[in-house]
Image (cartoon, rainbow, N blue to C red):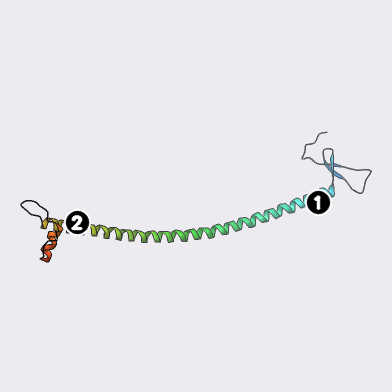
Amino acid sequence: MSYSFFQLRLVGRVSDSKQGPMIGCGATGIDMDTLTLFTIILAVTSIVLAVVSLVLSILFYVWSKRSNEDIQKSAIHIDHNTAEIQKLFDRFYSDTFGIMKNTVIAMQTRLFANTDSDTTKVVTTAEVSTVENNSEPLV
């Protein structure tokens, strides 16, 4: 008769009645009390591991929920700061190009107002300052 590895068979001992019946895989016999103790230890270990895994899964869920809430708060804060930076940039952009526009208009006004119409000679800044101050040229 052949048995597979997982099949257990009961082997009776006639000569030693203290130890009781033997359970074995094939020809190898193990004391039933030792096997029972080993099974109980494995069952308790399995239950402890199951409880530990359950506790860890709950802890990871709570931690991930807190982390998610913190990330959402940070995202809202970043969104608010980005909007503020955009407003500042728009203001800076409009101010900068407003200043540039005013400068170009002033330069064009000065340039075209002080141009000699016969020779198209541009009046220098020294000549402009003498006209404005009614003083001698600095050149």
Is 56 positioned to the left or the right of 114 in the image?
right
Residue count near mark 2 (Cα–Cα under 10 Å), binned few <14, some 14–19, many ≥20: few
Measure how far apart labels 2 and 1 are at the Cα level.
97 Å
Q: Amino acid at mark 2?
A: Val
Q: Residue at x 79, y 49 (%)?
A: 38
Q: Which residue is mark 1?
A: 37
Is 60 positioned to the left or the right of 50 in the image?
left
Which percent across, then down, holds residue 115?
A: 10, 55
Q: Residue furthest top?
A: 1
Which percent across, then down, holds residue 56?
A: 63, 56
Residue 97, quarter of the rendered image? bottom left
Which percent across, then down, holds residue 71?
A: 49, 58
Which percent across, then down, holds residue 2?
A: 81, 34
Q: Residue at x 64, y 55 (%)?
A: 54
Label 2 residue SS:
helix
Front tag of 2 and 1: 2
Is 96 positioned to the left or the right of 58 in the image?
left
On-image quarter of the N terminus: top right
